[in-house]
Amino acid sequence: MPTLTANSDASSAYAVAVSRRGWISCAVAIRATEILLSARSGSDLVPDLLPEDTEMEALHSRILGEERDEPVPVRQPTQHQLEMPDIRRTPVNEFNRSQAPLSMAFPTLFPRGQAEFVEPRLRPIKYADYIQHALRWHDGRFARHPTFRFVVFNTLMRAQARAKSSYFVKQHHQRRGPITRDDLLEAFQNPESADAQQLLNSINRQTAQLRGTRPYWYRKRRELESYAYNLDSPGAFITFTPADLHWRSLYQHLPQFQDWQELPEQQRMGMSSKLLRDNPHIAAWHFYRRFGLFRDIVLKQKFNVTDYWNRYEWQGRGSSHCHGLFWMDGAPSVDLENEHTRKELVRIWGSHVTALNPEPARVQQQGEGNPLAVNPLRHPLTFQWLSQILNRCQRHHCSETYCLRKKKDLGEISCRFFFPRAWGDKSCLTSHTITRFSLLLRV
């Protein structure tokens, strides 16, 4: 298309535009003609021939005589950000249902501010059920958060304490009237009086419902003592610790299982630690289920277990373990003062408990994989596989942060589990005492 100046003939420009319809449309040519006619004489310009509207809209407006020169409204750019709320001088009351403390404290977990516990629902839900549902959410963001579970657990405990204390006041209100501050001070100052003991014992009974508190575990201890009085002494005390950095059965339920299988051993251990920190609820539940199956399938059938009592604990890094007492039908007596019962205990338990390492001098070979990372149902049961598992997971390594203690009388540092131990040809009770209630069985 030839270059046009302001004093050029507009009709010739229109003719050129019409003759070359493949390059420019009629609507654009009409718009160009209007620009050329309105330009001043003697000034050069390069017209903007890009259409503002579609061809049909331009032609329709031209026929109706409508003006199309109104400015196009400019849209404001979308802001992909959240406005930070103002910091208030007074703290938020977490028990006030008119506020939403969780979404304000954890905006990354509640990006839209929805699904708060305080929101109205067709059916009421308990706070404990709400927490469990959040921890099981499909994307796992609540379980991965480093502080969310501690905050909601603290809120749950204090809410239970408020509920139990209100129940306690109502109970006493029915019996002797409201409890005053002076009554509590008098009870603490004279704890030996009958009224004071009744009041303080009632407080203990109410707070014993709060899981994890000292009164709660004191109540569990009294229950365990009652079991021992009625069922006699338990036959075994066993501690179960999971190999949670190695179990294939655990990591097949965690994210990135395929990547976990394909990584080298050293990188896999680092990934295992990260997955355990991000998914503590899955690891705890897996250990609970696996231990329950082991107890019901192996221990009950092999040792005739009739009753048991277990306590679950968690280490600083989140790894779980379990302490258990087991009552067994036909178990030997634990009266260590009697010589006959001592020999009977050594004879029976010496046949069940062994400490034999097939390869005590074994060193992990270059490129050797994790023996617990394979599918146990498809792997052949060999002594080599047993030796790999035993030397990896069931050998004690002394360390100052775990077992090495300094004796007060001698000033020497020794292992509190008495490792290393001397070899023995037969089972016997040694003179070492783990506690003042137990002796060490050497096998």
Image (spheres, helix red, strand yellow):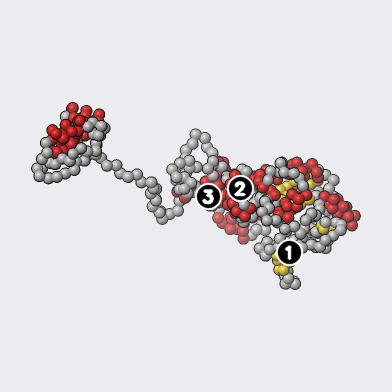
85 lies left or right of 24: right
Q: Label for residue 125?
A: none
- Asked which secondary structure carries label 3, the reply is loop
- Name the residue carrying label 2: 262
What residue is pinned by disc 1? 415
Whether the residues at callouts 3 and 1 have beta carbons within 8 Å, the answer is no
Q: Quadrant of the N terminus?
A: top left
Earlier sequence position, callout 2 versus callout 1: 2
Q: Quadrant of the C terminus?
A: bottom right
Q: How far apart, in angstroms, are the residues tagged by discs 2 and 1? A: 38 Å
The residue sitting at 43% across, 54% down in the picture is 90
Regarding residue 336, the answer to whether it shows in the image is: no
Q: Residue at x 55, y 53 (%)?
A: 180
Please provide percent x and percent y for residue 278: 56, 49
How dense is the environment of label 3, judged by Cα within 10 Å: few (below 14), some, or many (20 and up)? some
Q: Quadrant of residue 396?
A: bottom right
* Secondary structure type for disc 2: helix
| Left or right of 333 on screen, residue 188 | left
Disc 3 marks which amino acid? His
- Could you tell which of marks 3 and 1 lies nearer the N-terminus? 3
Say whether marks 2 and 1 touch (CB < 8 Å): no
Which kind of residue does numbered mark 2 sit on?
A: Glu
Point out the residue furthest to the left here.
Answer: 41
Per the model, the C-alpha gap separating discs 2 and 3 is: 27 Å
Relative to the observer, which residue lies in front, 437 or 388? 388
List the single residue furthest toward the right: 340
